[in-house]
Amino acid sequence: AQTVTQSQPEMSVQEAETVTLSCTYDTSESDYYLFWYKQPPSRQMILVIRQEAYKQQNATENRFSVNFQKAAKSFSLKISDSQLGDAAMYFCAYRSGTTSGTYKYIFGTGTRLKVLA
Amino acid sequence: GAGVSQSPSNKVTEKGKDVELRCDPISGHTALYWYRQSLGQGLEFLIYFQGNSAPDKSGLPSDRFSAERTGGSVSTLTIQRTQQEDSAVYLCASARQGIYEQYFGPGTRLTVT
């Protein structure tokens, strides 16, 4: 079975600085997707970024980028130029590829990010 | 367009009562997911519907939990004989077939007293 581990329950960053959130996963599959979701205090989960396992290039979305190390099964999220609005819970998630026949997602336990003014 | 909606936003019930939580997915989305999020925890998968296929119920924690999806659209999660440990936020998400991005609703906070 697949597992997702986020070992940092809480992180802090100064406004305008850079922070990296860690995520490791375990799977025997070769075809899968990885995601980072953000959950602000409003509870609304928002997709931040996704990575297809077959792509070697790391995904980037504006100030958000990932460091995807497939062999190490590591998928960290880097937030550059942190803003107060980035304060939220961040969840790492895994989904099997289409060949598996299932679209079930597995989420980590989350990292709470605090942004200090 | 309209996003995923859930109702009620908050529900307080007495131990032993049954509750129904509703999810309205985005129109055209064939996949629908239910998750449970306990205080300070991650998302626990409960059940997943995909089109007309049999649902994946592997995450339902006990036979007190059930869900249905009528007409491939609205879904209802039912918890019978609620227990205090059922207190949590219940999140619903929908997705287009074959597309990996889930769109989440705002959740229902269930409190069992």
Image: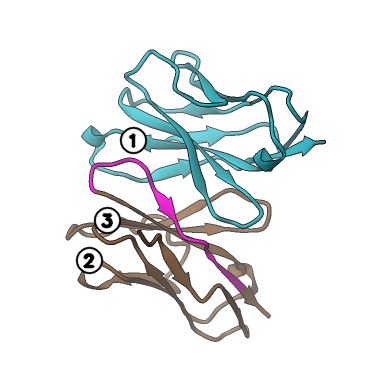
Chain colours: A cyan, B brown
Q: Residue at x 24, y 42 (%)?
A: B98
Q: Whole-Å distance between the Cαs marked 2 and 1? A: 23 Å
* Residue on which the image places disc 2: B72
Foreground residue among A14 and A22: A14
- Disc 1: CA contacts within 10 A as few (<14), some (14-19) or many (>=20): many
CA gap, disc 3 and disc 1: 19 Å
Q: Amino acid at mark 3?
A: His
Q: Please indicate, yes or no, whether residue B113 appears anywhere in the rendered image.
A: yes
Disc 1 element: strand
Chain identifier of the residue bearing label 2 in the image: B
Q: Is residue B101 magenta?
A: yes
Prevailing secondary structure class for the magenta stretch in the rendered image:
loop
Residue position for label 3: B29
Mark 2 in CB contact with mark 1 (< 8 angstroms): no
Q: Which residues are magenta?
A: B97-110
Residue B68, horizontal then vertical, whole percent: 31, 71
Residue nearer the viewer, A43 or B44 = A43
Q: Is residue B61 above or below residue A115?
A: below
Label at residue A96: 1
From the viewer's perspective, tell me whether residue A62 is left or right of residue A70: right
Q: Same chain, marks 2 and 1? A: no
Marks 3 and 2 in Cβ contact (< 8 Å): no
Describe the element under mark 2 as helix, strand or loop.
Answer: helix
Query: Is residue B52 left or right of A111 when viewed as pictured?
Result: left
Q: Quadrant of the C terminus of chain B?
A: bottom right
Vertical placement of residue A16 versus A92, above or below:
above
Task: State which chain disc 1 sits on.
Answer: A
Q: Is residue B36 magenta?
A: no
**Of B53 and A90, the residue lying toward us:** A90
Query: Of helix, strand and loop, which one carries label 3?
Result: loop
